[in-house]
Image: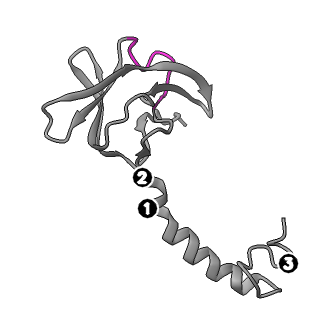
Amino acid sequence: MKKAQVSGLLYSQVGYDVGEPKRAIIRGHSVNFLPEDAVLRLISNKKTEIFFETNFKYWGEIWGSHWWTADFSGFEEPGNYDVNVFSGEKVIFSGEGLQIGERILWNSTWHLAAIDQLERRAILAKAKIGWNDAGGAWQEVN
């Protein structure tokens, strides 16, 4: 049976907060998969302006795949961007909808985590007081 040759571009589908680390990752099936001149470009959704460009660095091999990272932590301009990986003028990968802004992770997850998890913990917790996060009456006393 021949092994599947899986490759792809990975980045946060939720988005990135201003001031926090930001990375895109390439998964490739061989060490020679990504050309040495490959660059990550953040482009306006109107496809007209390149806002940021950086190189990829080979990270290594794990889980039967080879990995490269592009760090764009220094890019702090809030907005929505398309993510493209170029080798010369050739597009290797492209993606849409990368969002950079304030409190993106919090704003897109707090309701699900806070409300849903609290309801489940209230069922499981024995003490039935406070946040019920561990079931102990003294849990809130740190």
Disc number lying in front (1 or 2):
1
Q: Which residue is mark 2?
A: 14
Relative height, residue 73 to residue 119 (above, below): above
- Is 126 in front, or is 67? 126
**In the displayed image of the protein, which residue is found farthest to the top?**
36
Mark 1 and mark 2 in contact? Answer it, CB < 8 Å.
yes
- Is 33 in front, or is 43? 43
Task: Check disc 3 and report its element: helix, strand or loop.
Answer: loop
**Which residue is at 73% across, 81% downward?**
130
Magenta highlight on residue 137: no
Whichever of callouts 1 and 2 sits on the residue coming sooner in the sequence is 2
Disc number lying in front (3 or 2):
3
Mark 3 and mark 1 in contact? Answer it, CB < 8 Å.
no
Q: CA distance from mark 1 to mark 2?
A: 7 Å
Q: Which residue is mark 1?
A: 108
Q: Position of residue 98 (x, y in %)?
A: 33, 44
Q: Which residue is mark 3?
A: 136
Whichever of callouts 3 and 2 sits on the residue coming sooner in the sequence is 2
Which quarter shows the N terminus?
top right
Q: Residues within 10 Å of mark 2 (few under 14, many from 20)?
A: some
**Which residue is at 52% across, 34% downward?**
2
Q: Amino acid at mark 3?
A: Gly
Task: Check disc 2 and report its element: helix, strand or loop.
Answer: loop
Give, as a single range, the part of the protein colored magenta: 24-36
Whichever of callouts 3 and 1 sits on the residue coming sooner in the sequence is 1
The quadrant where residue 118 appears:
bottom right
Q: Amino acid at mark 1?
A: Ser
Q: Position of residue 88 (x, y in %)?
A: 25, 14
